[in-house]
């Protein structure tokens, strides 16, 4: 069933709360606002696309170990788990992928060309008549394709937060984009922004003045929509308080897994990967092969991740211990089902990427707060309808 786009109106959140600063940082009060984010429509090849997303994500983060931060890899194709939301630029409004694993903002241009139909999937294209052409170019590569084009300067708004005279890209070439979004807004740090590097500018989180933002990702059967809350967290979307993990790099949203482990029943396996990334642009949880194999054996999945669909109802929880806190993922969340076939949403491959990747499987279960001001990421149990 195809999901119909809902209203593009921005929804102010009356019950959102600002993030409390750490003891070593100050945070001025900010107006808190929320915007709806929408799920990619389902299709008949959901499981194939989810598996492909694993490979794309591994390629996406392999730059961490090879030192290619300047490449600024962008959002990959997230199959049924891609989320996108509205951005207003000048007098125009577009739906864009909201990706914490990249740091460039670009929109599809009217002169965009592609060999795979990518340029035709987002409508309408941005009109550049309102904006200043800088004469500079951007080029972003990612696991399944690329986007490149021209850099412009103008004012854009995400929720109730505005970036004035900020830089953004307008694509002239795209490959690998099969989603209905009109572009991409990266919410990572400036160190991995190609556009910032080309213009001596800043990343979108800096241009927007974001001190924090929270992601609530809806489950397919909840009947609700996802939500991104800016300058705080929406208390109606999580239960209890946040457990924070400090960042050890301001590139991607990266934190340490030192001393952590994963456990299923009485089987406990230490993480073999040193660091992890919180990434809204990755469908699965991708960890080291050793711990992934232990999970697969414990839940009855084969070496390719294929699993009985009954596990979604009867299987054990998978518990991740991160920074001394246990985070349980129920089988209804870690098993993906499509047309009577199922795969495990927790897989290996992190060694090739250089980091573990805690994507949508984790974020759907744990509301994730990206705290820019205090260089940390916080997790709280998501409150689904």
Image: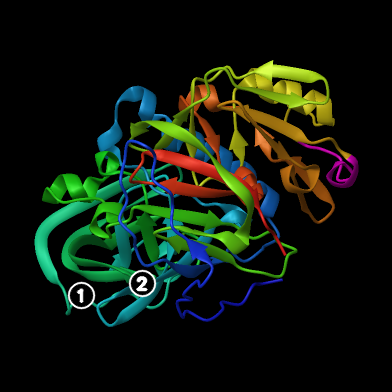
Q: Where does the N terminus fall, quadrant-wise?
A: bottom right
Residue 195 is labelled as none
Q: Is residue 284 above or below residue 212?
A: above
Gap in angstroms between the C-alphas marked 2 and 1? 23 Å
Image-based side of 361 in relation to 159, left or right? right
- Name the element at disc 1: loop
Q: Viewer-proximal residue, 305 or 205?
A: 205
Which residue is the site of mark 1? Answer: 128
Mark 2 or mark 1: which is in front? Answer: 2
Is residue 179 visible to us here? no
Q: How packed is label 1: few (under 14 Cα within 10 Å), some, or many (20 or more)?
A: some
Q: Is residue 152 above or below residue 131?
A: above
Residue 197: x percent and y percent? 17, 44
Residue 160 is labelled as 2
Residue at 43% x, 38% y is: 60
Q: Residue furthest front?
A: 23
Q: Which residues are magenta?
A: 306-314
Residue 263: x percent and y percent? 74, 25
Whether pointer 2 and pointer 1 mark residues with C-beta atoms closer than 8 Å, the reply is no
Membership of 272 in magenta stretch? no
Q: Which quadrant would residue 259 be assigned to in this image? A: top right
Residue at 53% x, 20% y is: 273
Q: Which quadrant would residue 269 be assigned to in this image? A: top right
Residue at 60% x, 26% y is: 324
Residue 282: x percent and y percent? 53, 45
């Amino acid at each position: 069933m195809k999901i119909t786009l809902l209203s593009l109106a921005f929804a102010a959140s009356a019950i959102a709360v600002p993030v409390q600063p750490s003891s070593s940082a100050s945070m001025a009060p900010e107006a808190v606002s929320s915007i709806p984010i929408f799920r990619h429509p389902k299709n008949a090849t959901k499981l194939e696309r989810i598996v492909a997303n694993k490979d794309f994500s591994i390629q996406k983060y392999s730059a961490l170990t090879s030192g290619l931060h300047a490449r600024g890899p962008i959002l990959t194709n997230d199959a049924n788990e891609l989320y996108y939301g509205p951005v207003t630029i000048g007098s125009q409004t577009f739906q864009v992928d909201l990706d914490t694993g990249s740091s460039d903002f670009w929109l599809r241009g009217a002169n965009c060309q592609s060999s795979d139909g990518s340029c035709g999937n987002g409508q309408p294209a941005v009109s550049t008549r309102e904006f200043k052409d800088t004469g500079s170019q951007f080029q972003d590569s990612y696991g399944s394709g690329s986007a490149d084009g021209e850099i412009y300067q103008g004012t854009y708004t995400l929720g109730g937060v505005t970036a004035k005279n900020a830089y953004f890209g307008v694509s002239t070439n795209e490959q690998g984009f099969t989603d209905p979004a009109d572009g991409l807004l990266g919410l990572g740090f400036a160190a991995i922004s190609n556009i910032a590097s080309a213009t001596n500018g800043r990343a979108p989180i800096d241009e927007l003045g974001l001190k924090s933002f929270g992601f609530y990702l809806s489950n397919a059967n909840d009947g609700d929509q996802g939500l991104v809350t800016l300058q705080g967290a929406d208390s109606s979307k999580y239960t209890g308080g946040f457990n924070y993990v400090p960042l050890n790099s301001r590139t991607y949203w990266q934190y340490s897994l030192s001393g952590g482990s994963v456990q299923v029943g009485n089987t406990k396996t230490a993480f073999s990967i040193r660091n992890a990334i919180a990434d809204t642009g990755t469908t699965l949880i991708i960890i080291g092969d050793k711990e992934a194999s232990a999970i697969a054996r414990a839940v009855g999945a084969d070496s390719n991740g294929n699993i009985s669909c009954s596990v979604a109802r009867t299987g054990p929880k998978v518990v991740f211990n991160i920074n001394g806190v246990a985070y349980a993922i129920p089988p209804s969340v870690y098993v993906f089902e499509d047309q009577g076939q199922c795969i495990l949403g927790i897989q290996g491959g992190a060694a090739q990427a250089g980091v573990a990747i805690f994507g949508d499987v984790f974020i759907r279960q744990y509301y994730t707060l990206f705290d820019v001001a205090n260089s940390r990421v916080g997790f709280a149990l998501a409150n689904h309808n």
